[in-house]
Image (cartoon, rainbow, N blue to C red):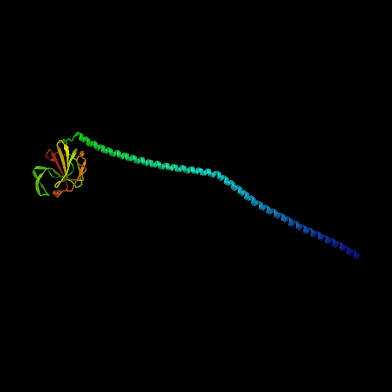
Amino acid sequence: MFEEKESFWQKKGFYFSACLLLVGVMAVGAICYRQANRKNTDKMMADIATEEPQETEKAAASEKEAVKAANAQVTPKSTHNNDKKTSQQKKNTAQTKVEKTSNKTKNGQTSQRAATKKNSAKKTKTKETSANITQKKLSFNEESGLLWPVTGKVLLKYSMTNTVFFKTLAQYKCNPGIMIAAKEGTEVKAAADCKVTKISKDDEHGTLITTDIGDNYSVTYGQVDHLKVKKGDVVEEGKIIATVAKPTKYFTKEGANLYMQVTEGKNTVDPLFLLR
């Protein structure tokens, strides 16, 4: 009986050992399988990881090429259009400048022409006036009289029969003309249509302008300067012929004045009888 029990436990131990061995083999197999499976998985993941960047790079490269192609199509047109716009703008600007310059030139030429015409008209008018006076021949009418050459008080009257007192000279003597008070620089006007026949000087009356007014009459203006006329000029009544000068030493006490003398032929005439 003891032997039977021992044999039983021996069998049992064998089966147990066999089971343990089987379990061990299965465990080792499972471990090997898991390792092999893990290697395959890692390899697959590595392959996938390698493929993804390549595909990503390919996709990126394709996208870049597409963008470049699009830009290549759009940019030339845009650049061409911009060049066209810029060129057109430059042309417009240049044309505007040319037009402005042309307008300025035209305006300048127009102004110059207008000024030239105006001056020519003035000269023509003056020539026509002088020509008209000359063609008419100088004619003086005593009834029409003379224009006052300056406005002022008569300091010394005409007197060829009686003597008048000259303050500066402190003496009485005859006076073939009149002295009209006027400030130095006062404009002197022509008393009638006339022609300048003589310009002279003397100590008593300074510079003198002698004019022919027609019908054997002449008018002389003395104590003048800044002459506006010369010998031979034909002057219309009322035109400026000179200005009143500083008085000579003969009239320092009388002060600045215009000397006026009228003659008919060789005889002097009282200007006050003719001034209107």
Which percent across, then down, holds residue 12?
85, 62
Q: Residue at x 22, y 35 (%)?
A: 131
**Corner quadrant of residue 180:** top left
Which percent across, then down, holds residue 49?
66, 53
Which percent across, then down, holds residue 48?
67, 52
**Corner quadrant of residue 29:** bottom right
Quadrant where the image shows the C terminus: top left
Is 161 or 92 nearer to us in this picture? Answer: 92
Q: Residue at x 54, y 44 (%)?
A: 74
Q: Residue at x 30, y 39 (%)?
A: 116
Question: In this view, which residue lies farthest toward the right?
Answer: 1
Question: In this view, which residue lies farthest toward the top?
Answer: 136
Quadrant where the image shows the N terminus: bottom right
| Left or right side of 94 for 243 | left
**Corner quadrant of residue 146:** top left
Q: Residue at x 68, y 53 (%)?
A: 47
Q: How many marks?
A: 0
Is 21 or 59 nearer to us in this picture? Answer: 59
Which percent across, then down, holds residue 264?
13, 38
